[in-house]
Amino acid sequence: MLNLKKLQASTALALTLGVSATSIAPMTLMGAANATQTPQKVAQLFPSQRPASTFGVRIPAGASFPVVYDKAERIVIAPNETVPMTLTIARNIRSSSGTLLIPAGSQVEGEFRPANDNNSQFVARTLILTNGTRLPIDARSDVLSRKETIRQGVDTGAILKGAAIGSGAAAIISGVTGKKRITLGRVLIGTGAGALGGLLLGRKTNEVVVVEPRTDNLSLTLNSALALNR
C-alpha cells in the first residue's frame, strides 16, 4: 500500500514537471526567435562597415552629397548645350550610425543640361563606387546660373585659363572674339554647337555659363531613393 502511494506521488510529480516543461518550452523558443530577429532588424537599420552588408540599404530621396570636378578649375558651357561629365564624391557619405555608405572618390557619371532661363544643371545617371560597382542614380544639382559675358575685343583669358570648355561655349567664344582656336582651356565634346546656328553670326556679345566646382559648393540631391545593392 505504501509502495502504491509512492508510485502515485511519483507519477503526479512527473506529470507536473511535464506540464511545466511544456509551458516553458514555447517561451524558451519564442525567446530564441526574438534573439535571432533582433540582430536582423538592427542590421537593416544600421548596416556594418563591410560592403557586403549594405545590400538592400536605401538612401532616401532628398538626401544630398557634395561633388567636385578635379580636372579643371572651372567649367564653361553654353546655356543650351549638353555636355557629358564625370564628377567625384567629395567626402565619405555615412549613415546616422557612422556606417560608410558611399566612399569619397566614388564617381558620378552624367551631363550638364540646359535648364530654365538659359541656365544649366547637372543630371546624374550612374554612380560608380570605388570598388567598381555601378549603380543607377537619379539625382541632379541646383540650377547653375552664374554667367560671364563674352565681348568682342575683350580678353577672355581670365575665364578660359584652366577651364574645361563645352564645344557650344567654344563656338560662342570663337564667334564673338573671332579666334578660331582656343588655347587656354580644354574643349570638351558637347551637343550645343550645332544648335546655336545663327545666334553666333554677327554677335558682339554673348553669354556662357561658368561653374566653379571648388568654390560653388556643388552638390547633388536625390530625386528618388538610391539602392546600394552591393
Image: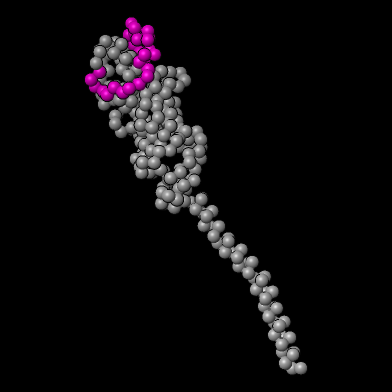
Depth check: give the residue in front, 22 or 186: 22
- For image coordinates 71% across by 89% down, the residue present is 6
Q: Residue at x 27, y 24 (%)?
A: 186
Residue 145 in sight in this render: no
Drawn side of residue 178 relative to residue 64, left or right: left
Give the x, y percent position of residue 130.
35, 42
**Residue 194 visible in the picture:** yes
Which corner quadrant of the image does residue 112 belong to?
A: top left
Expressed as whole percent of the image width and height from the top left, the position of residue 157 reads 25, 20
Q: Extreme right residue here?
A: 1
Query: Residue pushed farthest bottom?
Result: 2
Task: State how many labels appear.
Answer: 0
Name the quadrant of the C terminus: top left
Give the quadrant of the N terminus: bottom right
In the rendered structure, which segment of residues is drawn in magenta?
Answer: 182-208
What residue lies at 25% left-to-right and 13% top-to-bottom?
180
Q: Position of residue 178 (x, y in %)?
A: 26, 10
Report whether 89 appears left or right of 61: left
The image shows residue 190, relative to residue 12, as above or below, that is above
Image coordinates of residue 222 in percent, x first then y, are 48, 35
